[in-house]
Image (cartoon, grey):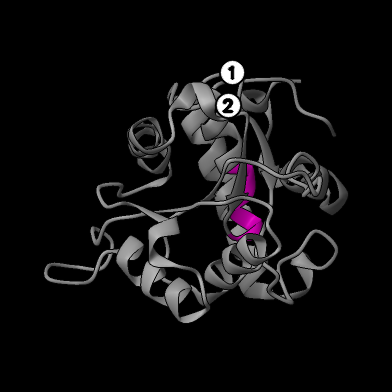
Amino acid sequence: MKLSELNPDTLSREEITTLMFHDTIDDQQTGECILVFGAKTIHRVIKAADLYHDKRAPKILVSGSAARWGENEEPEAIWMRDRLVELGVPSEDILLELEAANTTENVLASLMVLQRSIGLNQIHRLLIVSSPYHMKRCHLTLTTYMPDWISYSFCSDDRESGQRNNWWKDEREKARVMKELHSIQRYVKDGILKDGDVRR
């Protein structure tokens, strides 16, 4: 069955877990850069800093504007950079993407930053950092818009709730997962994301 053909409201908890979390695991490999999708949440920053200090990648790219926060607010990328520096990441190893206002733009705008700073032809693997519930959309967006020679390690943040094994136990995280699932299907139907077969 295609993703566009699913009815999210009829899926079992096990089917939702497989669909939203199966393809977004950390395979423990190293890469050329850690890409952090935009937000002002310390969970993502801590995860990115841990990956950097574990020498999984030599650079961190933080992506995100202030579009979601209002006029004269600090861009997400700047906020994340400052927290990363506080966690011991050298500022020269942090790349900034300041234009993106959503997940698709995080990927598209980061392409240019990666090309200018590293060279896309030099990138074989990116370590992806975001919230657990957001990882499936990150995965689909990356495979829709990024060059097909780049591979990914999906390193979701380490929050206690909202993980593959407990997302349904917290009402807030459960609502996030379900909202994401509906959004993903809408983006597929609108042609923003590639459609594809799903494992159930």
Residue at disc 2, secondary structure: helix
Check disc 1: other Cα within 10 Å, few if <14, some if 14-19, many if 20+.
few
- Mark 1 to mark 2 CA distance (whole Å): 7 Å
Q: In the figure, 153 relative to 187: above or below?
A: below
Look at label 1 and name its amino acid. Answer: Asp
State the predominant SS element of the stretch in magenta.
Answer: helix
- Can residue 189 be seen from the camera position used here? no
- Can residue 139 be seen from the camera position used here? yes
Residue drawn 68% across the image and 74% down it = 159
Check disc 2: other Cα within 10 Å, few if <14, some if 14-19, many if 20+.
some
Disc 1 marks which residue? 148
Residue drawn 67% across the image and 58% down it = 156
- Residue 148 percent coordinates (x, y): 59, 18
Determine whether, in the image, residue 198 is placed left or right of residue 55: right
Look at label 2 and name its amino acid. Answer: Thr
Q: Given contact means CB atoms under 8 Å apart, are the residues at marks 1 and 2 in contact?
A: yes
Q: In the figure, 14 relative to 67: above or below?
A: above
Image quarter of the N terminus: top right
Between residue 32 and residue 17, name the one nearer to us: 32
In front of the other: label 1 or label 2?
A: 1
The reply to whether the magenta stretch includes residue 129 is: no
Tell me which segment is drawn in magenta.
131-137
Between residue 1 and residue 136, name the one nearer to us: 136
- Residue 59 percent coordinates (x, y): 51, 51
Disc 2 marks which residue? 143
Q: Which mark is residue 13?
A: none
Determine whether, in the image, residue 35 is placed left or right of residue 29: left
Q: In the figure, 160 relative to 55: above or below?
A: below
- Residue 120 percent coordinates (x, y): 46, 26
Between residue 73 and residue 87, name the one nearer to us: 87
Residue at disc 1, secondary structure: loop
